[in-house]
Amino acid sequence: MANTYSQILIQAVFAVQARDHLIKPEWKEELFKYIGGIFRKQNQKLLAVGGVEDHVHILFGLKPNIAISDVLRDVKANSSAFINEQRFTRVKFRWQEGFGAFSYSRSQLDAVVKYVLNQEAHHSKRTFRQEYIGLLDKFEVEYEDRFLFDWLD
């Protein structure tokens, strides 16, 4: 796509199936590096990846030659296959269907990178449900609660 220029910054959020606490500290960084490799292979720009036991946040620069849903489909499929091949969990690992995707301006980049990388501390104060619904509300995304992630209470 000659003469096509863009700056599209996306924060994506997706959860482990059934919100199980399967992402363990001993292999989480290896997972994040693997996700980085998926982005490089797609020729997309990964800016930050972070998460806790039951969900992941990814901040990336999206090039206009691919849809967000295609990027995240590949990330979720390839990373879950990697987790299963490495036998990081005793059960079959799967990501929950769907994701949240939120766009940001260049002026917000530093704050969003810090937010994504600081998930451990962030979730000592807020649950995933509070965080996710807060994002949906902040970005004025209409939703039906029954179609959101499975929640652990």
Image (cartoon, rainbow, N blue to C red):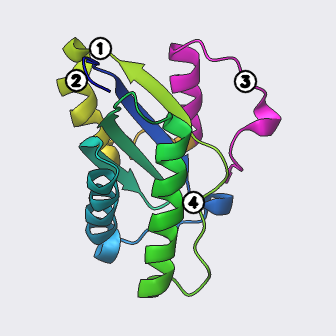
Q: Which residue is mark 3?
A: 143
Q: Residue furthest right?
A: 146
**Label 3: which secondary element:** loop
Foreground of the two, 147 or 85: 85
Q: Are marks 2 and 3 in contact (CB under 8 Å)?
A: no
* Dot placed on the residue nearer the N-terminal end, 4 or 2: 4
Kind of residue sitting beneath label 2? Leu
* Dot placed on the residue nearer the N-terminal end, 4 or 1: 4
Magenta span contains residue 134: yes
* Dot placed on the residue nearer the N-terminal end, 2 or 3: 2
- At x 22%, y 23%, the residue is 109
Q: Are marks 1 and 2 in contact (CB under 8 Å)?
A: yes
Q: CA distance from mark 1 to mark 2?
A: 7 Å
Kind of residue sitting beneath label 4? Val
Q: CA distance from mark 3 to mark 1?
A: 23 Å
Question: How many marks do you count on the picture?
Answer: 4
Which numbered tag is attached to residue 16? 4
Q: CA distance from mark 4 to mark 1?
A: 28 Å
Kind of residue sitting beneath label 3? Tyr
Residue 73 percent coordinates (x, y): 55, 51
Figure check: 140 above or below 70: above
How many other residues sit within 10 Å of disc 4, few (<14), some (14-19) or many (≥20)? many
Figure check: 86 above or below 82: below
Q: What stretch of residues is rendered in magenta?
A: 129-153
Q: Which residue is mark 2?
A: 109
Kind of residue sitting beneath label 1? Ser
**Label 4: which secondary element:** loop
Q: CA distance from mark 2 to mark 3?
A: 26 Å
- At x 30%, y 77%, the residue is 26
